Amino acid sequence: MLRPSSLLTSLLVAVCLLWGIAEASLGDRLPEFRECVQVCARENCDPNNNPTHIPIHRRLLLWTCPQECDYTCQHIITQQRLATSQPITQFHGKWPFIRVLGIQEPFSVIFSLGNLAAHNWGLTKLRRELPASYPLRKYYIMFAFFGGASWVFSTLFHTRDFAVTEQLDYFAAGASVLYGMYYTPVRVFRLDRPTPRRESVLRLWTILCCIMYIAHVAYLKLWKWNYTYNMAANVTVGLVQNALWSYFSWKRWKENRQTWAIWPGVAVAWLMMVMSLELLDFPPLWGALDAHSLWHLGTIGPTILWYNFMVKDSQDNIANGAKLKDIKA
């Protein structure tokens, strides 16, 4: 089993690598691309000169004539570069994807919906298999709500990349990650138990997490839209909760020697493995399947495993509590 110390080291290395590979796109700065867009807009977008008709399914997704020119020119320049053995480059920070029915990144949308389905399945499982009286049930259900919301906004963002869909995607993802950090100590240290000390700690922890999220959104929205900061904040929060879950997984396995007890460690290691896809970014296969979409695909399995763990862990706690009551009786 992967020990917490070695897992944390691996995560830190991955973070350093992620920070090191960030670079701006070049395609939208190419003179030939800019000229192509200008010519296209002049010949096709003049409202007084029979502008090119945009199909209804693309207009429903808010495609405009200038955006159609931008999309078309991306692929014209890409084909020209490939014909002269030049590498494919990004435009506006993204690869030149082939859209489907007006959807900009079809596989990222499909896999985002797959993650949404995994959270919906997990929510149903939690409600069906955990009694309403179980104190951790409400925290797990909120985890499903936050997770589901983040994938809804991810779907919207990958369908159409606007400033508003990007911001909603980032803010929802940040909320999901921070909620994961919030409920982790609640389970690991059982802050849900009604003792005066735990209630005080839980109250302070709740306030602190709310303040951190408000400050995070305020900084990005009111001060500076900073991609590096956003990534650093999410990765740091993820590191802390992953380390806690890895420790908890190891501790639970030592206590009961049950296979399900190591599932959190397996899920974290799984996520680390698929995270490497982001490090090995490559132009989209068939113009649609890129590293980022595969990262979304890779998170579906750990999500399912995580809900199974939460149910098993909860059922074990409930069974042990019942045994304890029988012994006292």
Image (cartoon, rainbow, N blue to C red):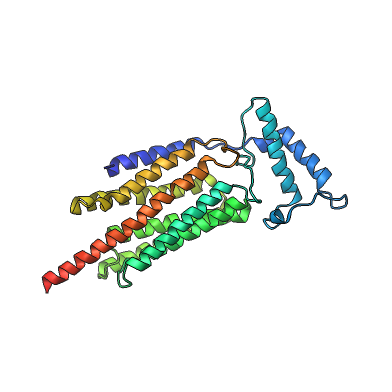
Q: Nearer the viewer, residue 34 or 213?
A: 34
Q: Position of residue 55 (x, y in %)?
A: 74, 53
At x 41%, y 38%, the residue is 14
Left or right position of 6 against 275 = left
Q: Position of residue 245 (x, y in %)?
A: 31, 51
Q: Quadrant of the N terminus?
A: top left
Asked if 133 appears above or below 59 in the picture, the reply is below
Residue 16 in sight in this render: yes
Residue at 30 percent across and 66 percent down: it is 192
> Which residue is pictured at 77% across the width and 36% down the height?
35
Residue 292: x and y in percent read 51, 43
Horizontally, residue 51 falls left or right of residue 25, namely right
**Across the whole image, how many numbered discs are drawn on residues?**
0
Q: Determine whether, in the image, residue 15 is placed left or right of residue 79.
A: left
Residue found at the very far top of the displayed protein: 85
From this viewpoint, is residue 214 visible? no
Comparing 2 with 6, the one in front is 2
State the image quarter where residue 33 is shown: top right
Q: Residue at x 25, y 70 (%)?
A: 195
- Residue 230: x and y in percent read 50, 49
Q: Residue furthest right?
A: 48
User: Which image quarter holds the C terminus?
Assistant: bottom left
Q: With 29 as the anchor, is 148 left or right in this view?
A: left
